[in-house]
Image: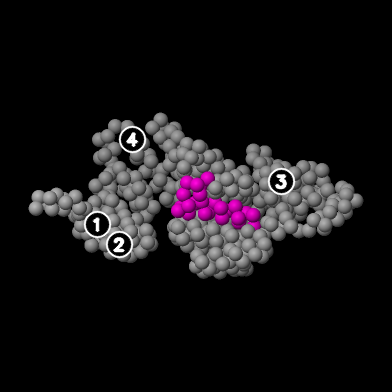
Amino acid sequence: MTRNIGMLSCLPSEIEVKYKMAECYTMLKQDKDAIAILDGIPSRQRTPKINMMLANLYKKAGQERSSVTSYKEVLRQCPLALDAILGLLSLSVKGAEVASMTINIIQSIPNLDWLSVWIKAYAFVHTGDNTRAINTICSLEKKSLLRDNVDLLGSLADLYFRAGDNKNSILKFEQAQMLDPYLIKGMDVYGYLLAREGRLEDVENLGCRLFNISDQHAEPWVVSGCHSFYSKRYSRALYLGAKAIQLNSNSVQALLLKGAALRNMGRVQEAIIHFREAIRLAPCRLDCYEGLIECYLASNSIREAMVMANNVYKTLGANAQTLTLLATVCLEDPVTQEKAKTLLDKALTQRPDYIKAVVKKAELLSREQKYEDGIALLRNALANQSDCVLHRILGDFLVAVNEYQEAMDQYSIALSLDPNDQKSLEGLQKMEKEESPTDATQEEDVDDMEGSGEEGDLEGSDSEAAQWADQEQWFGMQ
C-alpha cells in the first residue's frame, strides 16, 4: 500500500499532463486543440508557463484581447518575464502601462535600472519609431551590464535594416555572430542583406553553417533561398521559401522570399497573397509594403499601388523611406512626375545618403536628360559610401556625356563590389567593344564557340526546374 502511494506521488499532476498535451498539439500544428486543452485548466491553477503558452497561442490565432490578458497574468506572477513584456508591446499595449507592472520589482532589486530603459526601447520598436529605438538601444549597449549582449545587438541590427541602413545592420549582425557562433535568430535577414550586396559565397557559407546547427528552423532555408533567388534560380528559391514557411508560418522573411520568387516567375496574384500576410505579421516593416507595391506595378495596377503607398506614408510617417516609396509610384505616372521630384528632394534632405532615394532621383534626372546634375548627385552620394548600383548608374551617366574612360572605371568598381551585376558587365563590355572593335569581334566568335552554358547554369536547367516543380507539389505550394 505504501509503495503504491509512493509511486502515485511520482506521477505528474493532471495540470502538468494537460500542459504536455498542449505542447504536443502545438508541435503537430494543431493550435485549436492546444488552446482547448489549456482553456480547460481553471484560471487560478494556471502556472506562468501555462499562461505564457496560452498568450502565444491566442496571439497566433488573432485573439489579441485574450492574449493581452494572459501576458499580463504572466507578469503579475513573474514581473521579470521579458518575453511577456515583448508580447504586450507587440500587441500595442503602451510602454508606460507595461513599465508600471514592473516598477516595484525594479525598485526592490539593485542594478535593475536598465529594465525601464529596455522597455522604452522596445516600445519604440513596436511603434515603428526606428530612430528613437536605435538611439535608446545604443544607450543601453553602453552600459557595462549589457555591453556585448547578443539579443541587443540582434535587435539593433534589425532596426538598422528597417531604417534602410544596411551597412550598419550587417556590422551589428557580424558582431552578434562573433559573440554567439550558434546564433540563428535574425540570420535570415543577415543572409538577405549579404545576397543583396552580391556576396553570394558568404551567403552560401552562412547557409551551410546554419544547417549544421539545425535544419528545423526557418532561417537556414531562407538563407539558402536568398542564394538561389539572387542566382536567378527562382523555382528553387520558391521551394526553399515554402519549406521555411512550413517550419515557421510566422517567418516574415520566408514569406517575402516566396512572394518575390512568385512575382519573378510571373505568378503575381499568388505573390500578393504572401506579401499581404507578411504585412499582417509585421505592419511596421517597410519592405513588406515594397514587395506588395512592386506586384501592383508589375500588373499595371497603379491606382492600387498609389493607395497603398499613401497609406504607408500616413501610417509610418514622413521619413526618407516612405517618401521614396511614394515617389517610386508617382514616377510610374507621367501626371505625377513633379510630385515625385518634390518627394525625392524631401527624402534626400532628410537622408542624403539613402541609396534608394538617390537611385530614383537619378532615374528622374535621366528621363529629363540632366546628366550633369545626375553625375553631381551620384558623386555626392558616393563620397561617404560605396554601392554597386550607384557606381553603375554613374557609369551610365558618364557614357551619356562621353566620359568613356571614367565610365569604364565606374563599371569596374561596380563589378568589384558585385561580380554578378549583369548591367555593369554589359556596360563594361560595350565600352571595351567600342574601344577595340577587332578584339570585340574575336571575343564574340569565342563566345559563340563556348555557347551559353554559363547563362544556363545561372537560370537553372529545364530538368532542375522540373525537379523543383515536383518539390513544390510535395510542399503544397499554392
C-alpha gap between disc 4 and disc 2:
36 Å
Find residue 213 and report its horizontal and vertical position in percent: 47, 46
Residue indicated by mark 2: 35
- The amino acid on which the numbered mark 3 sits, given as a three-letter code, is Leu
Magenta stretch containing residue 222, yes or no? yes
SS of the residue under disc 2: helix
C-alpha gap between disc 3 and disc 4:
49 Å
Residue indicated by mark 1: 17
Answer yes or no: is residue 346 visible.
no
C-alpha gap between disc 2 and disc 1:
14 Å
Residue interval drawn in magenta: 209-232
C-alpha gap between disc 2 and disc 3:
54 Å
Left or right: where 422 falls relative to 137: right
- Are discs 3 and 1 less than 8 Å apart at CB? no
Residue indicated by mark 4: 113
| Foreground label between 2 and 1 | 1
Q: Earlier in the sequence, mark 1 or mark 4?
A: 1
Q: Residue furthest right?
A: 438
Left or right: where 192 falls relative to 54: right
Left or right: where 253 falls relative to 9: right
Q: Earlier in the sequence, mark 2 or mark 3?
A: 2
Residue at the spot 29% in from the left edge and 38% down from the top edge: 106
Rendered image: mark on residue 395? none
- The amino acid on which the numbered mark 4 sits, given as a three-letter code, is Asp
SS of the residue under disc 1: helix
- The amino acid on which the numbered mark 1 sits, given as a three-letter code, is Val
Q: Earlier in the sequence, mark 3 or mark 1?
A: 1
Image position of 462 with respect to 354: above or below: below
| Foreground label between 4 and 2 | 2
